[in-house]
Amino acid sequence: MPHVLIVDDKEENLYYLQVLLSGNDYTVELAHHGAEALVLARKNPPTVIISDLLMPVMDGYTLLRFWKADIHLRKIPFVVYTATYTQAEDERLAISLGADAFILKPCEPDEFITRIREILANTAAALPTPLRHQTGDEKELLKVYSETLIRKLEEKTLFLEEANRSLEKDLIERKHIEESLRESEQRFRATFEQAAVGIAHVDLDGRFLRVNDKLCEITGYSRDDLLKRSFIELTASEDRSQSDQARHSMLSGTQKTYNAEKRYHRKDGAIIWVNVIVTLVRDNSGQPSYFMTVLGDITERKELESRLLRAQRLESIGTLAGGIAHDLNNILAPIMMGVELLRVSPNPEVSEKVIQTIAMSAKRGAELVKQVLSFARGVDGARVAVHLGHVVREVETLILTTFPKNIVLQIDIPRNLPLIMGDPTQIHQVILNLCLNARDAMPDGGHLTLSARPS
């Protein structure tokens, strides 16, 4: 099995050639400069030597001169493999010093192995020949050799100077980048801590990673307390399933952001309304990293909305007052007439019918009062699953009781209408307001249709 000595000061080059040659049935020995290569070769002469030129301690040209001057080594093929000495005069000098081949880096693996095999085959078939000196005598050869080394050293010096300038530029740019990052981080910290809304970084399981002072103020918890808790713990039980569903949707990629109005528990036990905006932050590889949450206290706004809604309901009752009074008069008339009949009629059968009429009228009156009181009070802020058909039926009862009889009401609500999330009292108010506007637009009567369809 052919034995190859590789000489190069770059570990990655040694490793590459070792793997390549070992995979092609060569045994390999490694040296990091010319002096080490001479010691190894004299102990265990190789079948072929493959050497770089630009190396510390002893460069490839010097190694080649010593190699061809050694009676025991001169017959062993010497292959130059270089990426630095690439000019024609560099190759001529190497051949003049006795190199058997001059190969430029990089070389395709198959081509490289083919060249090595050709060199070994040609060496085995060739007759011994004296050392060639194409440039003339030894002095002339040394002159060319010296000039080549000086030229390469000058090129290397220029390269190092350019690399040093580039490094200095990179260091300046890196310093500017670090300063920009530091300023950006300071701005972020200031924005994070001094924001007028609560801000938090939350891990994928919902636990707080980082919170600002405003969030502590809104929830009543200290920073240390919040960092031991999760958003789910603060969320009112009625809103937890919605939050959990949104978290899974964002992690699965079906939802980018989550925006909702929810109820939270303060540390003192009070319930507050908050507006929550949640965004999933991903790392450079696109994997979920953490949630960015922005939270604002909207309790005062919700209370104002509740008061406004109650005022609107009372206003609606005032608008319907004429119809309600008319219906109450129709209900009270049979009661009053029945009382007089009971006083003057001794007939038991007549009395029984009168009593039934009075009872029915009283029940109708109680139902009307119950509807008016229920509508006036309402239950605000409850976001629940609502079937529009049920809300429309409640509005229908009020319309039939209070609207003029020349307005014909038609309801078109399918039974399979899907549920919606919302506040039934607010939905009731919106539908009733629309109907009142329609009534006012038809002073001479007309048709009023309430219909709904899934989107």
Image: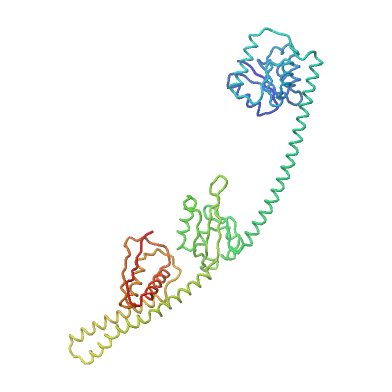
Q: Is residue 427 above or below residue 161?
A: below
The answer to which quarter of the image holds residue 86 is top right
Q: Is residue 290 above or below residue 195?
A: above
> What x and y, as percent, mark residue 245?
46, 56
> What x and y, as percent, mark residue 224?
60, 59
Q: Is residue 18 above or below residue 322?
A: above
142 and 303: which is toward the camera: 142
| Residue ID at (45%, 59%) | 242
Drawn side of residue 90 relative to residue 279, left or right: right
The answer to which quarter of the image holds residue 388 is bottom left
> What x and y, as percent, mark residue 149?
78, 24
Direction bottom: furthest residue: 344
Label tally: 0
425 and 405: which is toward the camera: 405
Color theme of the render = rainbow
> What x and y, as percent, mark residue 410?
31, 69
Direction top: furthest residue: 127
| Residue ID at (35%, 83%) | 325
430 and 289: which is toward the camera: 430
Drawn side of residue 53 relative to residue 291, left or right: right
92 and 203: which is toward the camera: 92
Direction right: furthest residue: 139
Where, quadrant-wise, is the C terminus in this rendering? bottom left
Q: Is residue 95 above or below residue 281?
A: above
Drawn side of residue 408 relative to residue 313, left or right: left
Where, quadrant-wise, is the N terminus in this rendering? top right
